[in-house]
Image (spheres, rainbow, N blue to C red):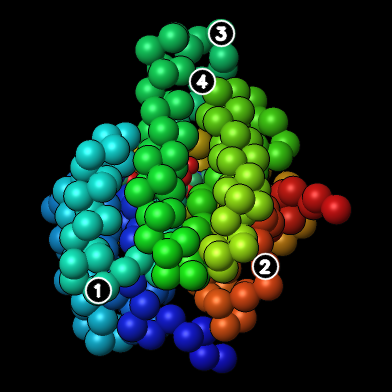
Amino acid sequence: MDLGLNGKSVIVTGGGSNIGRAITLGFAAEGANVTMAELDVDQGGRVAEEASGLGGGQVRCLRTDVTELAEVEQLVAAAVEDHGQVDVLVNNVGWDQLMFFTQTTPEFWERVIRINYLGVLNCTRAVLDGMNAQGHGAIVSISSDASRQGEPREAVYGGVKAAINSFMKTIAKENGRSGVRCNVVCPGVTVPEEDEEVGENSMWVDKDNMFTPEQFEKIAKSLPLRKVGRPRDIANAVLFLASDAVAGHVTGQVLSVSGGYSMIG
Ligand SMILES: NC(=O)c1ccc[n+]([C@@H]2O[C@H](COP(=O)([O-])OP(=O)(O)OC[C@H]3O[C@@H](n4cnc5c(N)ncnc54)[C@H](O)[C@@H]3O)[C@@H](O)[C@H]2O)c1
């Protein structure tokens, strides 16, 4: 199926590691031009090199902190200069540390809110005027099933991700008239397969710090599909939602890609 993404200008935040890496590679394989916003430019550069050979588009990584609006605006300007416009924004950056709420500090809350939410506000704001003016655009934000279920040790993160779901619906309503579509993908536990799939800044550098091997096994067994997610699972859903050719009438939706962990009617 042709997703019609060949030659599109796509921004992927956090495109160097795990889910973001798979999203970058997925768009690159479709022939899109990808501009990655990354703090870890070593890892981002390696992914850009890997992605560049896939579909003929240009893939590059620019050092950008998504929590800083001025840096995000520079990134968007660079994508527009090179590719004329931004067709797709994927808000993928996210961060958390698993702790019970009573173990967390106000400094931790602020960090979670800045990286997970302020980053999405900055990037969305920076692309919207251009998307409205050109009369089309797709924004896909990566949330989490923690936003839908409530998840022990992810209290602040789950709350912030729920804010992203709501924010995207409002942006979908405010901008749909000019052809801008906004959707959300909620991963469940999504684990890199190889060490090279993550850079030093990734939450998954030390997998055992997230979940013990026994917990991974338990999680897999508890899911209807009996397996944890892989980055490519999430990337496939993002490509679908980003494509006007196949998802052109889909907006304001929150899609769980989590092996059946969440089933929302
Ligand atoms: N992996 C999972 O199990 C899982 C589950 C639910 C939701 N999610 C969500 O999926 C998204 C991706 O998760 P992941 O596991 O691939 O994360 P990851 O930690 O492996 O990768 C995140 C990437 O973002 C970059 N980054 C971090 N802060 C940044 C900033 N301020 N500016 C620019 N780049 C920054 C990092 O350098 C890293 O390369 C996140 O939004 C996360 O909350 C992940």
Disc 3 residue type?
Thr
* Residue underneath mark 3: 102
Quarter of image, res 46:
bottom left
Disc 2 residue type?
Val
> Considering only order in the chain, which callout, 3 or 2, is on the residue closer to the N terminus?
3
Label for residue 10?
A: none
* Residue underneath mark 1: 83
Q: Are marks 1 and 3 in contact (CB under 8 Å)?
A: no
Q: Are marks 2 and 4 in contact (CB under 8 Å)?
A: no
Residue 77 visible? The answer is yes
Assign a secondary structure to mark 2.
loop
* Residue underneath mark 2: 250
Q: Is residue 171 above or below residue 176?
A: above
* Residue underneath mark 4: 99
Tell me which residue sits at (41%, 33%) in the image. 118
Q: Are marks 4 and 1 in contact (CB under 8 Å)?
A: no
* Location of the N terminus (image quadrant): bottom right
Q: Is mark 4 within 8 Å of ligand 1?
A: no
Mark 1, Cα crowd under 10 Å, few <14 / some 14-19 / many 20+, is some
Residue 218 vs residue 74: left or right? Answer: right
> Considering only order in the chain, which callout, 3 or 1, is on the residue closer to the N terminus?
1
In the image, 168 versus 177, the foreground residue is 177
Ligand 1 quarter of the rendering: top left
- Horizontal and vertical percent position of residue 214: 56, 40
> Considering only order in the chain, which callout, 1 or 2, is on the residue closer to the N terminus?
1
Disc 1 residue type?
His
> Considering only order in the chain, which callout, 4 or 2, is on the residue closer to the N terminus?
4
Tell me which residue sits at (37%, 40%) in the image. 122
Tell me how far mark 2 sits from mark 4, CA to CA. 35 Å
Assign a secondary structure to mark 3.
helix
